[in-house]
Image (cartoon, grey):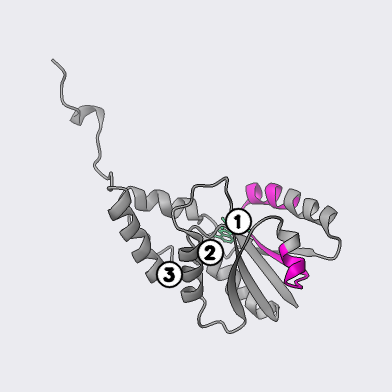
Amino acid sequence: MIAIYPGSFDPITLGHLDIIQRGAKLFDQVVVAVLRNPNKAPLFTVQRRLEQIRTSTKHLTNVEADAFDGLTVNYAQMRQACVLLRGLRAISDFEVELQMAHTNKTLSTEIETVFLATSNEYSFLSSSVVKEIAKFGGSVDHLVPPHVALDIYQCYAQNHPVSNQITTESTKPLQS
Ligand code: ADP
């Protein structure tokens, strides 16, 4: 049974990796599928995200990374997959995910969405949280694989100078 794990993965986090590792035990093959989404301005190119995923999952022989455009169900049919794998962190995820699963069901009755509940330690974790911390100069070593952390630090050092100086009302220079 082939499962597609679709998402942005901008970048892959330890939360994603947890779902991939657990999915790899449940399914014969897990395809981590990076959506080329023209509506989002990503931090990393699709190519870089694929490299990050491949390096993070090289110990898992039944996991591969690929990129796709358009509807996830069309991609799943093309790959002969009958499962869409998704992770659930909180009630807020549940609402969005349930709507997406129902919508996908109207597009293809053959494809089932399977949800894995996040492991407790990653329930707060998202790619956005990682980027927000890194943007302000914080460490993300505990949130992403080591090679991804390096990519993030490099990216912010080159393109986005870290703004981690704390300015408060009392430290602002007085205006004359
Ligand atoms: P999207 O752009 O679809 O939100 P993401 O890359 O953020 O893509 O996430 C892909 C999938 O991984 C989603 O099902 C999301 O709920 C799940 N996910 C993201 N972070 C975590 C986490 N920390 N624990 C479990 N699942 C997660």
Residue 15 disc label: 2
Residue on which disc 1 sits: 89
Of label 1 and label 2, which has the lower sequence position? 2
**Quadrant hosting residue 109:** bottom right
Residue on which disc 3 sits: 145
Q: Whole-percent x and y of residue 154?
A: 31, 60
**Quadrant hosting residue 165:** top left
Location of residue 80 with respect to 111 vertically, above or below: below
Position of residue 122 in the picture relative to residue 4 (left or right): left
Q: Whole-percent x and y of residue 84?
A: 72, 65
For ligand 1, tell me if the residue under mark 2 lies within 8 Å.
yes
Query: What is the secondary structure assignment of the residue under circle 2?
Result: helix
Q: Visible in this render: residue 38?
A: yes
Query: What is the secondary structure assignment of the residue under circle 3?
Result: loop
Location of residue 19 with respect to 138 vertically, above or below: below
Looking at the image, do the residues carrying marks 1 and 3 touch, with CB atoms under 8 Å apart?
A: no
Of label 1 and label 3, which has the lower sequence position? 1
Crowdedness near tag 2: few (<14), some (14–19) or many (≥20) residues, C-alpha within 10 Å: many
Q: Which residues are magenta?
A: 75-98
- Label 1 to label 2, Cα distance in Å? 9 Å
The image quadrant where one finds the C terminus is: top left
